[in-house]
Structure formats: structure tokens, C-alpha cells
């Protein structure tokens, strides 16, 4: 997606050669027009599947996931990073965070995920695929079907991309990064 790559080139900041900061349009301040286009791109790619729910993990996946869910006309469910006291019956998984270097707990109420669901997982970044593995475990427990994986910024030089492909999932990444270094961001190919 050319516009997204342009935004990344103009606004992205590389930290320690492996983390990309995009706080101006995705991770802190959010650009609604760009999110709308991102949602439409995912919709156009995944509309061939019988998706009835778009799933993400809070926080930064919510904006693109919501825009995509609006295109499908289906609910968006965000998996929570903490277990609220109000959530009694839930599916749980552990996720190792690449950026925070620690393991955290994710959970979703059993009310919102079941064997009848055909889900599209959307996330802001793909690094080592740990967040996806947590979501996959939760979907397995709920017997929900993952129809596809939509990633806004895929750091293809890390392990997650190949892991998801090797598992046989249909992966759509709107920007694929080949490398991050002191000169900035190098894209793998234009989407
Ligand atoms: P993974 O689970 O694939 O190892 O990492 C993906 C998750 O870590 C994303 O949900 C995102 O929150 C965070 N993440 C990974 N790499 C980056 C990065 O370069 N920049 C930002 N802002 N978040 C990242």
C-alpha cells in the first residue's frame, strides 16, 4: 500500500535497528483517513472468505481492525491484555512481547468467540508472531476458524511472517519491511 509506505518513510523512527516507532499515525495519534484506507485494503483482500468477526489485541490493533470490520459489516472483538474482574468465563493465553521483553496474559470472554466464528485477525505490527500464536491458541480452544491474518506493518526480517505462512494461513501485509537501519526503513516490495 503506497500511501502507508509513504507515511512510514516520512514519519517512522527507527529504534535500536529493530523497532519502528509510528506514533504519529498508528500507535499513539491515529490518522482516521489512513485507517479507513487500511480497513478497505484488508476488506478487498479477504472478502472472499466468510468472515463474521474481526479480532485484534488491544491497543494498537483496534483502529485498523475496527475500520476493516466496518467494511465487512461485522463486529470487531479486541482481546484484552489484562483480565477484568467483570470477566468471569474467558479463554486465556500467554504472549511474549518483543517490544516490552516480557510475557503478558491475554483473555477474551467466551461470549464473543465460539465454534461458529470465522475470524480475520488484524494487528498493527508483525515481528516474531508471538501475538498471533496467542490468538491462535485462544481460537483453537474456542474452536473458531481463523480465515486470514491482516498485518499493517510486517517486519519481514523477523520470524513471524514465515511462521504464519508455514502454518498455512493466508497472510496479507500492507507494508513489508526488509530492514531497519540508521538510514531508515527499507521495504521488501510495494503492495
Ligand atoms: P510479535 O507478537 O509478532 O512478536 O510482535 C507484534 C506485536 O509487538 C505487535 O502487536 C506490536 O504491538 C508489537 N511490535 C512488534 N514490533 C514492533 C515495532 O517495531 N514497533 C511497534 N510500535 N510495535 C511493535
Image (cartoon, rainbow, N blue to C red):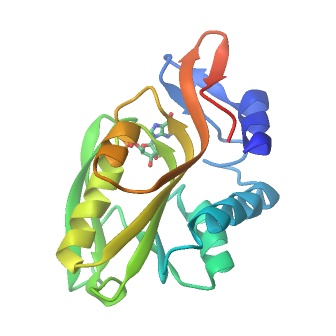
The image position of residue 166, as x and y in percent, is 30, 44
Q: Residue furthest top?
A: 182
The image position of residue 136, as x and y in percent, is 28, 62
Quarter containing the N terminus: top right
Tell me if 21 is positioned left or right of 106 in this view: right
Q: In this rendering, is residue 154 above or below 185? A: below
Tell me if 68 is positioned left or right of 113 in this view: right
Front in this rendered view, residue 180 or 2: 2
Front in this rendered view, residue 109 or 116: 116
Residue lying at 50% horizontally and 44% vertically, measured from the top left: 125
Ligand 1 - quadrant of the structure image = top left
The total number of labels drawn is 0
Residue lying at 37% horizontally and 56% vertically, measured from the top left: 169
On the question of residue 84 being in view, the answer is no
The image position of residue 147, as x and y in percent, is 41, 69
Q: In this rendering, is residue 3 above or below 85? A: above
Residue lying at 69% horizontally and 60% vertically, measured from the top left: 41
The image position of residue 146, as x and y in percent, is 36, 69
Amino acid at each position: 500500500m503506497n500511501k502507508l509506505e509513504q507515511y512510514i518513510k516520512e514519519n517512522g523512527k527507527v529504534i535500536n535497528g529493530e523497532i519502528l516507532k509510528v506514533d504519529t499515525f498508528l500507535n499513539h495519534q491515529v490518522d482516521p483517513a489512513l485507517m479507513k484506507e487500511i480497513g478497505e485494503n484488508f476488506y478487498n483482500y479477504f472478502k472472499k472468505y466468510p468472515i463474521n468477526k474481526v479480532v485484534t489485541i488491544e491497543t494498537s490493533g483496534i483502529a485498523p481492525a475496527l475500520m476493516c470490520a466496518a467494511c465487512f459489516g461485522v463486529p470487531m472483538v479486541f482481546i484484552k491484555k489484562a483480565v477484568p474482574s467483570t470477566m468471569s468465563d474467558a479463554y486465556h493465553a500467554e504472549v511474549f512481547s518483543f517490544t516490552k521483553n516480557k510475557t503478558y496474559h491475554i483473555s477474551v470472554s467466551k461470549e464473543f468467540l465460539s465454534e461458529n466464528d470465522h475470524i480475520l485477525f488484524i494487528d498493527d505490527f508483525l515481528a516474531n508472531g508471538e501475538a498471533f500464536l496467542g490468538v491462535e491458541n485462544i481460537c483453537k480452544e474456542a474452536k473458531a476458524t481463523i480465515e486470514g491474518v491482516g498485518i499493517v506493518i510486517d517486519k519481514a526480517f523477523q520470524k513471524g511472517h514465515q511462521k504464519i505462512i508455514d502454518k498455512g494461513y493466508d497472510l496479507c501485509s500492507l507494508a513489508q519491511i526488509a530492514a531497519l537501519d540508521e538510514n531508515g526503513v527499507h521495504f521488501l516490495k510495494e503492495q
